[in-house]
C-alpha cells in the first residue's frame, strides 16, 4: 500500500494551491493577528471566544475583499491593506460605518444608528 504523503504529485498540488492562494492566506493572517493585538492592547474584551471570533471575522472580511478588488479591476494585494484597516477599526466600528452608509444611500434617517 502506497502512502499518500510519499506521492510527489500530492505535494506539488499542495504547493501549487498555496502559491495560487497566497494573497488570501496572507490577508487573513494579517487581519487575524492585527485584530488580536488590537483587542489585547485595548484590553476591554475579557472573553477569549469573542476575541477569536472577531479576529476570524476580520480575516474573512479581508479574504472577501480580494474578490471585490479583482471585480473592480484593482490590485488584489489591496485586500491585505483593507483587512488590516478592518482589523484596526474592529468589527463593531465597521458595522456602524456600513449601517450609516446604507442608510444614507437609501435616503433614510441617520439618527437610527
Image (tube, rainbow, N blue to C red):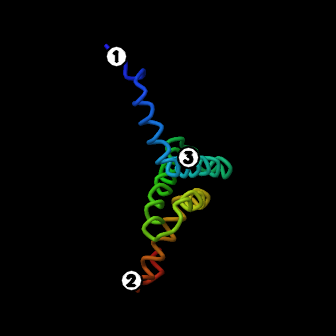
Q: Residue furthest top?
A: 1
Can you identify the residue that label 1 sits on? 2
Residue 103 is left or right of residue 52, and the answer is left
Compared with 75, 9 (above or below) is above
Q: Residue at image x 60%, y 46%?
A: 33
- Cα separation, mark 3 vs mark 2, equals 35 Å
* Image quadrant occupied by the N terminus: top left
- Looking at the rendered structure, the secondary structure element under dot 1 is loop
Are there few (<14), some (14-19), or many (20+) residues within 10 Å of tag 2?
A: few
* Location of residue 74 in the rendering, given as x and y in whole percent from the top left corner: 51, 68
Residue assigned mark 3: 29
> Callout 1: few (<14), some (14-19), or many (20+) C-alpha neighbours within 10 Å?
few
In this orientation, which residue lies closer to the viewer: 74 or 36? 74
In front of the other: 97 or 86:
86
Where residue 81 sits in the image (x, y, percent)?
59, 60
- Report the mark closest to the observer, 3 or 1: 1
Furthest toward the right, the residue is: 41
For the view shown, which residue lies furthest in the bottom direction? 107
Residue at horizontal 42 percent and vertical 76 percent from the top? 102
| Mark 3 / mark 2, whichever is N-terminal | 3
Marks 2,1: beta carbons within 8 A: no
Front residue of this view, candidates 8 and 74: 8
* CA gap, disc 3 and disc 1: 34 Å
Q: Helix, strand, or loop for circle 2? A: loop
In the structure shown, which secondary structural element does the residue marked by tag 3 occupy? helix
Which residue lies at the image location 41% right of the left edge and 36% below the top edge? 13
Q: Earlier in the sequence, mark 3 or mark 1?
A: 1
Judging by the rendered image, the residue that carries numbered circle 2 is: 106
- Look at the picture and state if 69 lies above or below 13: below
Residue 14 location in percent, x, y? 44, 36
Amino acid at each position: 500500500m502506497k502512502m499518500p504523503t510519499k506521492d510527489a504529485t500530492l505535494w506539488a498540488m499542495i504547493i501549487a494551491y498555496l502559491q495560487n492562494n497566497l494573497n488570501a492566506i496572507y490577508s487573513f493572517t494579517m487581519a487575524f493577528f492585527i485584530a488580536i493585538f488590537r483587542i489585547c492592547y485595548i484590553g476591554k474584551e475579557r472573553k477569549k471566544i469573542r476575541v477569536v471570533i472577531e479576529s476570524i471575522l476580520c480575516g474573512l472580511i479581508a479574504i472577501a475583499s480580494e474578490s471585490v478588488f479583482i471585480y473592480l479591476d484593482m490590485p488584489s494585494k489591496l485586500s491585505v491593506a483593507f483587512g488590516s484597516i478592518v482589523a484596526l477599526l474592529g468589527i463593531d466600528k465597521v458595522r456602524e460605518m456600513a449601517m450609516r452608509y446604507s442608510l444614507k444611500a437609501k435616503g433614510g434617517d441617520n439618527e437610527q444608528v
